[in-house]
Image: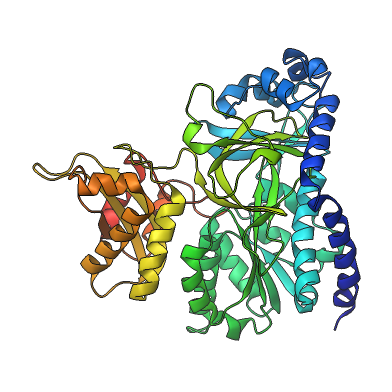
């Protein structure tokens, strides 16, 4: 056992001790966070405009701070981007995280000097929790790779600006720098395909023990490694590879394909980082869900997702949530986001401690006919059918077809890239449809009422989604294919790839 591995166990024990102090008192921790955030931002432009000096309770907070999405908050953010100080948070931000919005174009999310350490601490603690629970430390002494965006930062009015993963790359602890790959030069390559090829060359003969990234792009990396090795499994290329850390999408639709190319089952840690803040991470290999970080500079609110588009939806604090209910997640952060609708939906699977699963996006759903199908339902239905028919999925997305050929009923159109297709696509489609009807009563009613016909699956050519994302300028990095769309933009872009 190496020196780092030996030290990691007492370090992990201490970190978990610190976490446990707030984990069992999460509601109290959230009250303290809300009070602290309001006090710290009292003299900002936003604080003055929203009467922070009058806020003493959560009821006061809800009275003075409305729920906003990026566009609603944009007048304040634009002032921050233009270089003004003391607008949303005290002073100027340390960074502006640049993200791609579906409706807002490029978005700039402020990261403060107070919020940046929380990103690093959460990523570290996710690994330390794993070490403390499992006792496994071998990965610490090997090489670690983080598939991420370029660390090259631009500047806007004196504030460094770039992708979150690129910003984080500047804050990797010194004790991990010697273990970390790829090199800075390789990380700076902008073209994703060129970058993956360079990473393959740079890592092929290394002792990779931990690999981290968004599953579809890690899959791309693995495929190219395997191709270079003449079809070898990843376990035979990296004999000590033992831990996969991921976030951004649900891993389950990718798990079977990933384990096939790896050649064995492997431990994994799910994380929930966002430019707006590090929200949760998997703190247990045996319990379901991600530990909500209740003492990390974020005060959370939860809106029942079926009320989100109401004129006056309920806003709930952590102590008011219920298990197994979908909520739209609202953030108030120590970087100056207030009543901010991040766009994700979550549900609680535990309240002791508070653990969540991410169920989808509040604006990524299909409700062309009032069915309000969500991401969790389509993923679950597809996984059930895939397990039964021994099918492997590379990627998929679903959209409504409201204008079918004359005489046909409308339907949900599924675009699936299979790595192992079903022998009988029609039978597989029926099985997916049956599962969907069981998971969504409104969909069931529309099918049985002859308003919709059963879903139709379009099998796509190999590499279809990568080619589509490349055509949209969204190949690699933190980009993800939406599981659901209520329009035809993605569907129409994939039609040419139908095999």
Q: How is the image coloured?
A: rainbow
How far from the left and from the top, in percent, is residue 206? 69, 78
Q: In the image, what residue occupies the spot 36% across and 76% down?
A: 390
Q: Is residue 21 left or right of residue 447?
A: right
Q: Pick the residue in front: 202 or 452.
A: 452
Q: In the image, what residue occupies the spot 50% across and 51% down?
A: 480
Q: Pick the residue in front: 308 or 139.
A: 308
Quarter holding the N terminus? bottom right
How far from the left and from the top, in percent, is residue 483? 43, 51
Q: Is residue 417 left or right of residue 293?
A: left
- Is the residue 262 above or below the residue 150 in the image? below
Can residue 299 be seen here? The reply is yes
Q: In the image, what residue occupies the spot 72% across and 62% down?
A: 283
Q: Residue furthest left?
A: 407
How far from the left and from the top, in percent, is residue 62? 68, 23
Quarter holding the C terminus? bottom left
Q: Quadrant of residue 182?
A: bottom right
How far from the left and from the top, in percent, is residue 347? 57, 48
């Amino acid at each position: 056992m190496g020196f780092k591995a030996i030290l990691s166990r007492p370090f992990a024990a201490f970190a978990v001790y610190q976490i446990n102090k707030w984990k069992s008192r999460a509601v109290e921790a959230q009250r303290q966070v809300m009070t602290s955030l309001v006090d710290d931002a009292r003299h900002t432009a936003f604080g003055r405009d929203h009467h922070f000096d009058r806020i003493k309770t959560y009821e006061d907070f809800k009275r003075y701070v409305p729920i906003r999405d990026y566009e609603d908050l944009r007048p304040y953010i634009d002032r921050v981007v233009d270089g003004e100080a003391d607008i949303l948070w005290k002073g100027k931000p340390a960074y502006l995280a640049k993200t791609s919005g579906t409706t807002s174009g490029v978005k700039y999310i402020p990261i403060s000097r107070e919020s940046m350490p929380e990103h690093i601490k959460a990523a570290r603690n996710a690994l330390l929790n794993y070490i403390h629970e499992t006792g496994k430390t071998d990965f610490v002494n090997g090489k670690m790779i983080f598939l991420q965006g370029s660390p090259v930062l631009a500047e806007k009015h004196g504030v460094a600006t770039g992708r979150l993963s690129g910003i984080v790359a500047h804050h990797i602890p010194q004790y991990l720098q010697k273990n970390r790959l790829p090199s800075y030069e390789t990380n700076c390559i902008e073209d994703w395909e060129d970058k993956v090829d360079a990473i393959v060359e740079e890592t092929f003969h290394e002792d990779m023990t931990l690999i981290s990234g968004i599953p579809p792009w890690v899959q791309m990396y693995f495929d190219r490694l395997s191709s270079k090795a003449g079809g070898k499994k990843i376990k035979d290329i990296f004999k000590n590879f033992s831990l996969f850390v991921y976030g951004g999408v649900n891993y389950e639709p990718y798990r079977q394909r990933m384990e096939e190319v790896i050649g064995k089952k492997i431990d994994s840690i799910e994380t929930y980082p966002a430019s707006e803040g590090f929200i949760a991470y998997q703190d247990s290999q045996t319990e379901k869900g991600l530990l909500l970080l209740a003492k990390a500079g974020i005060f959370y609110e939860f809106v029942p997702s079926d009320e989100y588009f109401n004129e006056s939806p309920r806003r709930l604090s952590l102590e008011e949530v219920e298990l197994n209910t979908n909520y739209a997640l609202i953030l108030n952060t120590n970087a100056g986001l207030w009543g901010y609708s991040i766009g994700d939906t979550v549900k609680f699977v535990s309240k002791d401690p508070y653990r969540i699963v991410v169920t989808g996006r509040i604006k990524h759903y299909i409700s062309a006919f009032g069915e309000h199908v969500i991401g969790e339902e389509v993923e679950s239905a597809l996984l059930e059918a895939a397990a039964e028919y021994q099918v492997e999925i590379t990627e998929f997305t679903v959209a409504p077809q409201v204008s079918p050929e004359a005489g046909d009923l409308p339907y949900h159109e599924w675009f699936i890239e299979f790595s192992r297709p079903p022998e009988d696509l029609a039978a597989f489609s029926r099985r997916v449809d049956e599962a969907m009807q069981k998971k969504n009563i409104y969909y069931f009613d529309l099918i049985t009422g002859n308003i919709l016909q059963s879903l139709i699956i379009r099998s796509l050519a190999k590499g279809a989604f990568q080619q589509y994302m490349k055509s949209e300028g969204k190949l690699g990095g933190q980009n993800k294919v939406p599981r659901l769309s209520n329009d035809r933009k993605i569907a129409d872009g994939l039609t040419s790839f139908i095999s």
